[in-house]
Amino acid sequence: MKKIFDVLMAHNLPKAEAFINEINGKKPLFICTIATTETAKIAGLSAAGKHPEFTDYTPPADAELLLLGKCKCITGVPVTPDGIPTPALISMSSLKLADTPVLIVNAGSKVNPHIPFLDLGGKPGGDIRTGNAVGNVDEVIKRATIAGEHLAKTADYLVIGESIPGGTTTALGVLSVMGVKAEGKVSSSMPENPHGLKNEIVKTGLLAANESFGSLAKNPIRAISCLGDPMMPALAGLVMGSAAQVPVVMAGGTQMAAVLALVNALNPEVLCNVAIGTTRWVVEDKSSDLKGIISQIADVPVLAADIDFGPSKFNGLKAYEKGIVKEGVGAGGAAVAAMATTGGAITKDMLLREIEKNYGLLMESRT
Amino acid sequence: MKKIFDVLMAHNLPKAEAFINEINGKKPLFICTIATTETAKIAGLSAAGKHPEFTDYTPPADAELLLLGKCKCITGVPVTPDGIPTPALISMSSLKLADTPVLIVNAGSKVNPHIPFLDLGGKPGGDIRTGNAVGNVDEVIKRATIAGEHLAKTADYLVIGESIPGGTTTALGVLSVMGVKAEGKVSSSMPENPHGLKNEIVKTGLLAANESFGSLAKNPIRAISCLGDPMMPALAGLVMGSAAQVPVVMAGGTQMAAVLALVNALNPEVLCNVAIGTTRWVVEDKSSDLKGIISQIADVPVLAADIDFGPSKFNGLKAYEKGIVKEGVGAGGAAVAAMATTGGAITKDMLLREIEKNYGLLMESRT
């Protein structure tokens, strides 16, 4: 796979190269869109383990970590049940190294983070098994589009990530009802991807909404309302408002494919200015297929930060090499941006050292 | 008074000249900080007239006008009882002409605007006659400072205005308890400035808080808590976070003097990067004395947009020349920024034509 700086051109090579050349040396704004859902609390679905209510705290805690370098609404940092740290650690370290400004967008989080955040009038999401997952979709898209139009004027380009537990299941829901084959292809933060459970949940949701595979291909608003999550209208609106003016990195894995499907259905012209930015762990993942999903939707490039935690001295980081966590909180996109913004001066090694430093500090502060 | 472009160097000439030269041709971000209080509902105090509850709708409506070009939470636009339009019309026209991005900061508005806004965890303010006017001051200052640090990285300079009814009375309260002589010097949106009533209200508040003139000169947090309003901690924090990095225009009249006193008490070093931007109507006003207040606090320059509504064909705009409204919603600072950002290409005449165009459109849409 061709590399420019420590960034892999993972899909659609000519466009990927053109995109990274366009953002080379430019200054981004990083946006993290947070939300929570009842879907995330379904047993066995996400890495939240025995305490499903913890999923309500992960997004605001991630947001606090990005802005403050520590969490306020929880002690320590978000971890998997095995103690593997949140990917926000990668994002935060990348943003710090490149001195990148951060804006948190609250798209519908049950718990408000103790930091400044942009409110778009969204509410926490329901359980997609009811077929009635998200309210106020149209209004949130409108507000997010306006925000995107203004934010595009504040930076050379935007990097937009998310923190929403259970987000690959809602992604599968929206992709399916919009006619994109994503069964067995969405990613997971767990080493064993529970594809069967995700398929069951989506099937139940489709039935409850009286919809079927592809039935809402032309109705993205209803697709989100029935089977999506609150991050989607916010992120889609931000992309539509901003990508008409500046390049936009959609920072995430297979969840971004669902947002891509929405943007493609609502305003496909802006996609010429859009790339997906993710991690090597996502593009190399055998249990999911990001490229297989997005190639059904639109001809956008995929850039993947070639991060490698193999040489790390911390077991919590080494675990990423076993397929745990993989992506989230815009980690891959933030790392790509840090590398591109500095014309390659920030390398994967430098990034690992910064991540280890911050991880060490956070572990110390817990004891 | 010396003019550069159509901007009057209204106070502290050498610094005013240096400041406008520094922002000449540079690109700003415009921030409007909104909040409401019970103080504003005191009869006879603000231009709200017979319907004090209308003051709860003015700030969100102003914010909507800035971002959407029309209001959503009310029909038409905010007007005085005589039908004189909100100064947000001046801000909106200036921002449109100069293609300036806008961010609304909700510092504590009882009614949420139907647009994206930055939440700082603030709540609507009480009545300063109770001596207990604003909660959570310390936390809002902290969050606003963090926001300011990040926003400073998104623009060459910031212009920060406010929309809060009754704001000159809370300004008088905070200035007094901090030992700044402001009786008879604060501005008013009405042609007859009710100085006697403002003095009475502040006297009652001081008594209730068990404080006196100058007793909180070294305790700005308590000064806001007792006698201020929710705009103040938000705006002071935004200035402190951003002015360490980029020039900041505090866009407003005598209300900004109170914020200046707070910043001066909390972090005076940043003031070398700060100017007050206002309108000719404020600096020429015989019923108030902006320069007399700020010269007691700090050596910052005052820039005043030389806007002239005398030649307007609309009576609603001509009224500004009789001392009605004068300033608000960052009107003066937005006009200064539009002129400076374009190196003087935007003139007072061009601005008046744009304001008249937008006023005409808004009047049409009401009928």
Image (cartoon, coloured by chain):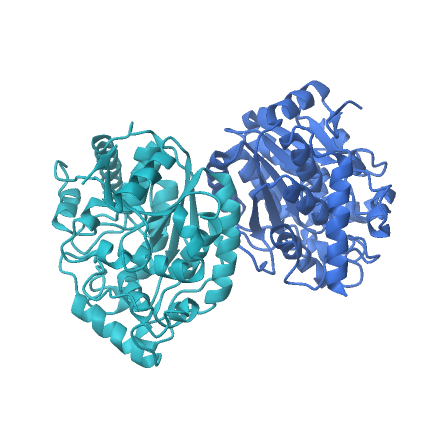
Chain colours: A cyan, B blue
Which residue appears farthest toward the top when viewing the image? B14
**Residue placed most toward the observer, A62 or A351:** A351
Residue B263 appears at what percent x and percent y?
59, 33
**Residue placed most toward the observer, A179 or A175:** A179
Q: Judge whether residue A109 can be spotted in this image.
A: no
Quick check: B285 above or below A141?
Answer: above
| Residue at horizontal 28 percent and vertical 60 percent from the top | A296
| Residue at horizontal 45 percent and vertical 53 percent from the top | A240
The answer to which quarter of the image holds residue A179 is bottom left
Q: Is residue A109 left or right of residue B199?
A: left
Residue B105 appears at what percent x and percent y?
56, 48
The answer to which quarter of the image holds residue A25 is top left
The quarter in which the C terminus of chain B is drawn is bottom right
Count of numbered tags: 0
Which residue appears farthest toward the front when viewing the image? A14
**Residue placed most toward the observer, B271 or A226:** A226
Residue B88 appears at what percent x and percent y?
70, 48
